Image (spheres, rainbow, N blue to C red):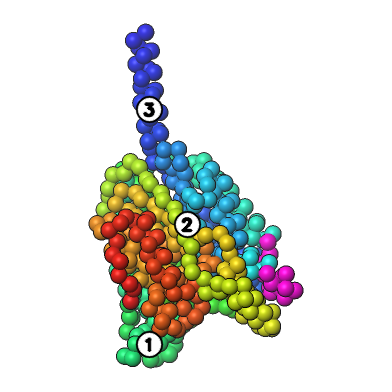
Amino acid sequence: MRASCTAIWLAAVASAAAWGQLRVGTFKSDVTPPLGQPLIWVMPTTKIEDPLLAKGVVLEDRGQRYVLCAVDWCGLSNRSHRLLRDKVAKAAGTTPDHVALQTLHQHTAPYVDGDAYALLEQMGRPVVRFEESALVQIADRLADAVKKAAGSMRPFDQVGTGEAEVERVASARRLPTPDGKVVIRFSTDGKKPEMAAAPEGPVDRTVRTVTLGQGDKPLVRLHYYATHPQTWCCDGRVSADFVGAAREQLEKEEGVFQIYFTGAAGDVTVGKYNDSSVAKRTELATRLLAGLKKSDEATKWSAVTELNWKSLPLVLPKKLSTQQEIDARLAEAKATDDEAARYRLTIAAAFGLRQEPLSASLLSLGPVRIVHLPGEPMLEFQRFAQIAAPGQFVAMAGYGDIAPGYLCTDRAYDQGGYEPGASNTTKGAESVLKQTLRALLGSRAPTGSGR
Ligand SMILES: [Zn+2]
């Protein structure tokens, strides 16, 4: 009798341990567009230089599951983002608000907004669109990979944090002038001597790496670094660009699953160091890889027993806030024969019409705080998040649902220039976003405004 009581007691302890155990599964799925499907904006794919991947983790704690997913695409917005996120959630056995689906924002990759396509078709002015059947096929393949990962999770009990400087990769897109204005340095402007010679400007050179491990064995590494990962664009060639090259090389060398997220890179590019040549792209990949390796080597471990997740709705002020403004934008789109312009104008109108709030989320794991934002947040928001959680290791991934476009500071809206001009939000977005970051990260955040 006593023996069987002991057995029951031991079984209860064992199941409590399993319940409290953190588990992780990794997944990888090919998201390369089939030939003929458009890359940003409407350029049909003609050649695959290297495949595009969606890589991520399924995490489990106390019966709840969460997914972090990094997709080698330029952008996914509105119903197209929702399609992938919902399928991933279902495959992982969780709800969509437990999924952070972020793109890396390469410009040799698709930019897909199903709401804009629908509006264009309604007005009888369709563009070369990413076919729904091709998108569903890619989403289903990704969901299969997520399902397999959820079915083969391993326990982890350590989280590692590492950081290192990445030298001569990120550079500011907005260069301040003495009269308080800005000069814009685009991703390929390194071919202009004066732009290559101009200072790097305000950037965050630090790559931050989160490692999940069992004992001292790393199981997966997640890297966060803020720059537009764009060395060339818009000629029909597909590539995961220099960030994909560095990530995959590291995975090969280290033998550990590697995931890369683009941080708050709205006003950061490689423009100082890039002239679109293969040589420059290779140099950028080499220097990023060196930074990733240093960050891995700097890993400090902490024991972890639980994770926490917070997701908040995010309602940003819209640039097109009245039906009249939206109608005017749609009329402008209808009138132009430039298909790329027609698509871009309609994307702006689609955000004006959007009813569903965006979302922002936070994963907390020991000292680690990983923030997921939609759109293309300016670097200021990454800095703000880091100050908002003193003593914590804060990493940020931008480029979730890209429907709002650039998320700018009030100051940038006043100054003007490329990002506020292209943004679908407007002045006031800064305070909403900062309030949300404060609510995610805790109340001790500063109240100041951005640069
Ligand atoms: Zn961008």
Q: Which mark is residue 14?
A: 3
Q: What kind of element bears circle 2? A: strand
Q: Give the range drawn in magenta.
A: 119-132
Gap between marks 3 and 2, in whole Å? 38 Å
Could you tell me residue 170's position as x and y percent? 37, 75
What amino acid is labelled 1 in the image? Lys
- Nearer the camera: disc 3 or disc 2: 2
Q: What kind of element bears circle 1? A: loop
Residue 302 inside the magenta-drawn segment: no
Residue found at x 61% / y 60%:
79
Mark 1 and mark 3 lie on one chain; the one further toward the N terminus is: 3
What amino acid is labelled 2 in the image? Pro
Q: Going by the picture, which residue comes out furthest to the top?
A: 1
Residue 115 left/right relative to 168: right
Label 3, residues with CA under 10 Å away: few <14, some 14-19, many ≥20? few
Mark 3 and mark 2 lie on one chain; the one further toward the N terminus is: 3
Could you tell me residue 443's position as x and y percent? 30, 56
Specify the principal SS of the magenta part. Answer: loop
